[in-house]
Amino acid sequence: MPAAIGVAILGEVGLDAIIGSTIAGVSAETLVGYAALTVGTIGLQYGAQALLGGEKRADHQITVRQAVAPRRRVLGQAKLGGVIFALDTLKYNDTNKVLYRGAVHCVGPVAILQYWLGDVKTGLASGPGGSVPDSVYQGKVVIEGHAGTDDQPASSALLKLPYWSASKRLAGLCYSVVVATPLKKGSQIFPEGAPDVRLLVAGAPSYDPRSGNYAYTDNAAIVLLDYLTHASGYGLALAEIDLASFAALADVCDEPVALVVPDPNGATAEMRYRSWGAYDYTEARAEVLARLLAACDGELIQDADGRVAVRGGRWQAPVVTITEAMILGWDQLEEGDEAYSSFNRIKHTYTSPWHDYQPTEGDPWDDPAAQALQGVIETEKSFVRAPSHSQSRRLARIAMAKGNPRFRLSGLRLSPAGLPAYGEPTVWLDLPSFGIAASFAVMRGTLAMAGKALTGVTLDLISLDASAYAWDPAWEGQRPPMPDTWN
């Protein structure tokens, strides 16, 4: 069974040629939505204006019911809005009302780190929330935060509504409830009407094969393993995964990388590969998986036991040499230099915590020598799960080297003597007749069979060496300016 599972996953991400097999008709993922909840109708059309006191108000149109939204899960960190499930008002005197607004943000369990009202970070500490301490809110705004545990109780605020009950616990869902009374100059504080709560959360605990424990992490390899094993991803059992390969890549991800310019929090170093963000359960699994792999230069392969393994993120020197005596033939050999590069500038995108956790374009990675010969040829790469400009630049450098190899060899057919090369990340190619003596990365591999006997292997190779992964902190480039410094 592990072999079939490995084939399926590699087929979904377009890597089926690695194992010489393809699949068809992969089952569509079950679409799971948030629980549909009954919302009271009294005063809903006025809910968005309940904070404006006695001021004159413009007419508003507000959305009070929405289609059931897909579930969303966080790995690493993410800043999230929500889907409104409760919006109501109750009178507390002859002229004023109390506003109640509930919104589901993601599946739990998570840790709530920050509370935001619209684009403004509040003074509320991490945890379950409380009265918002910032003076602008006049002590009249309370936010409840629910982390999405399976045993969480019902909202104490919503229990004041006549149609809410203790059985409506929203178990497993992270949600917020705002309770607010009219504010002076409320239309200026909440120009959009009802306060829009956004949460910064740290995602669910993930299994780390190095310790055998579950804990929060943003290590890109551990986050990738989480998605492969979670029910919302591929749902694999740990026995179907080469855990040693994930542990090895996790160690690489944990390696510190120095920062020439400290980040806005003052940090002078960061982990080599981190992974932040959320995904919807309705997304194509291959798309989510591709984002997770891109954050650590990862590749999925199938090991000798048919389990899913991972490699990448670092240079691994060849241990197998391919000589001319092993070669039966090949389909195509391309040789070029900078003058024939397919691109020489990579425009890359990452998620910047300093720009509202939004996808942000980084300082492009350039090949000046190639640009001097042929002008600028651009391509774009997305590293949106990378939460760092430096990390995104490092990934862009690797992508530049892989995208513009000196040699590209397709359909290299080897005799049985070349079988040890199958499954290797790199090989040394010694072809004196063609002036080639260099290291190559193995991009694809297929075993040739005659009955049950292995008769050879076919490989696709690109020239690559350790320089692709070398990094000088001076190369981290210019981060995008902080929002408050924009002109």
Image: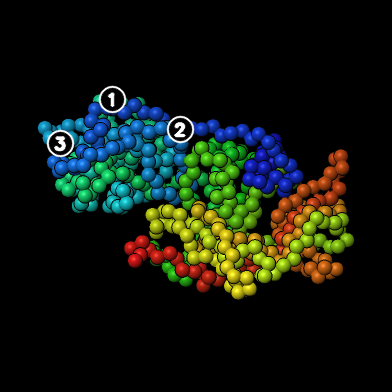
Residue at image point 45% right, 32% down: 33
> Which dot marks residue 96?
3
Q: Is residue 228 above or below residue 87?
A: below
**Towards the viewer: 459 or 276:** 459
The quadrant of the picture occupied by the C terminus is bottom left
Amino acid under disc 2: Gly
Seen in the image, is 58 located left or right of residue 338?
A: left
Seen in the image, is 422 located left or right of residue 367?
A: right
Can I make out residue 250 in this image?
no
Amino acid under disc 1: Tyr
**Which element carries disc 2, helix, strand or loop?**
loop
Q: Few, some or many C-alpha atoms within 10 Å of disc 2 (few <14, some 14-19, many ≥20)?
A: some
Mark 2 touching mark 1, by CB under 8 A?
A: no
Residue 226 percent location from the top left of the image? 55, 44
| Farthest left residue in view | 94
Marks 2 and 1, Cα distance to the nearest angstrom?
22 Å
